Amino acid sequence: MATIKDLRSFIEVLKEKGSFEKVSQPVSLEHELANIGAALARQGGKAVLFEHVTRAEDTIHWPIFTNGVVSPATAAVALECAPNEVVNIIGAALEPANAVPARKSDKEAPWKQNVITGDDINLYRLPIPTHGALDGGPFITGGVTVSRDPVSGRGNLSYNRMQILGPHTFGFNVNEWRHTMQFYKGQEKKDEPLKLAIAIGLDPAIMIAAGARYDNDELLIAGAIRGEPVLVDKGVTVDVDIPFHAEVVIEGYLPPHTRHAEGPLAEFHGYYGELWNSPTFEVTAICYRNDPIFQTIVPGWAEHVYIGNVLPREPLLLRFCRHVSKDVKALHIPPYANGFAAIVQLEKSNPGEPKNVALAALTAHVNVAKVVVVDPDVNIYDPADVLWAMTNRVEPTQDVFYIKGAQGHEMDPTADMRGVQTKVGIDATYKPERRDYGERIRYPEIDLSKYLSS
Ligand SMILES: Cc1cc2nc3c(=O)[nH]c(=O)nc-3n(C[C@H](O)[C@H](O)[C@H](O)COP(=O)(O)O)c2cc1C
Ligand SMILES: [Mn+2]
């Protein structure tokens, strides 16, 4: 049985594994919290709980957690496995045959301990951080949208950034081709609202599942990760199945035919986006368990990219690459390249193989536009090692190839407005036939604490 079933048990396991930091001193919700989270992501990738957050006087001061799934180390903690098993566990959980349906609880969810409705709702009181320096204001970025298709009845999880527009109104960002948007458009045709709930403070299996593009309820993926059903309970004002162990739940609806400007917000590609004309979310209930932990994701930074662009796609790329060569050892989509690049580790058996493998990775997902193939002696999780290989094992005129006019993501900063771009493959493997350098210098990893006195 899984040890992790909610955010609290995840925090306990993060502590045991040394991937957790606590900030006890007061931290401002305006930029300061996000700056610390981003720095921790950059310097080793640890999760963090802010025990004391501050803003205006009447803000509710719940502690805030961030960086849950921010690095290979925390992803491994979240999935209760070794870092090199992460891709296999997610790959297996995404297989429809392994789906585990959610189960309705016969008890009331703890988040029904406190329920705010009607005129008592005031979103300005919630501890919602303003993250990036140029963000348009406070945004919920780490909440999971739980909805249900009123036509087919199937459930869905997604991420939708939400900017406070009024005391009970959020701007609700949702791209055209998302499932949530399909459900909403179906309701608009009938002039009816789409009811949904935002679950905050969750088991990371649910956070990871919500980032995947999947043709069924993403709760099935979370169940497959844990090997047991996700427990759910109905909302107080909406009829959707909400994770039982959520810390905070915000319920409401998207009124039909309503659009309002929201943004900008730090986007996954590493720049601030523009204002979007988005549906609005009218809040009908705010529910929370006693002494809840709020959760956020620092937008445009490692956790955002890890959940949205890295974890759900690595298994797919690995499958395409292994179809081309059985000698592919490992694959990583590094979050610092925003999901636009992939690094493949290959034990090549002939000189042409790295280019074929690079082509496979380039076609596996539309966002992937830069692929580097390295030997097994290169640590694909260490940018310095990858750059070493690119510097010392690449002769550009022979080892780099371009595919002009390929389809990429419309928001890739190197693509045109339709996403048309040049994709590039780089064979950064060692070519001893060109010039034989023999052995690469290696000093083994050692436990420095045995030698250093303080
Ligand atoms: C932290 C985070 C924030 C995101 N914000 C948005 C957003 O504001 N709008 C959007 O359309 N997609 C956003 N996404 C992407 C989608 O929510 C996500 O990929 C999801 O799989 C879409 O699911 P759906 O097709 O089931 O609706 C975000 C992803 C992450 C990880
Ligand atoms: Mn979906």
Image (spheres, rainbow, N blue to C red):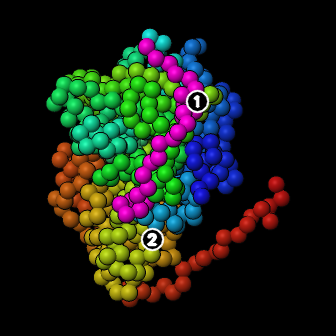
Which quarter of the rendered picture does the N terminus lie within? bottom right
Q: Position of residue 154 (x, y in %)?
A: 31, 44
The residue that mark 2 highlights is 330
Query: Is residue 57 magenta-colored?
Result: no
Left or right: residue 414 versus residue 55 is left
Q: Is residue 44 visible?
A: no
Give the number of the disc on residue 289.
1
Looking at the image, which residue is at 34% across and 55% down? 340
Magenta span of residues: 93-118
Give the number of the disc on residue 31.
none
Q: Position of residue 78 (x, y in %)?
A: 55, 53
Q: Position of residue 183 (x, y in %)?
A: 25, 37
Q: Position of residue 269 (x, y in %)?
A: 35, 45
Left or right: residue 278 versus residue 392 is left
Label 1 and label 2: CA atoms lie apart by 41 Å
Q: Where is 15 relative to 379, above or below? A: above
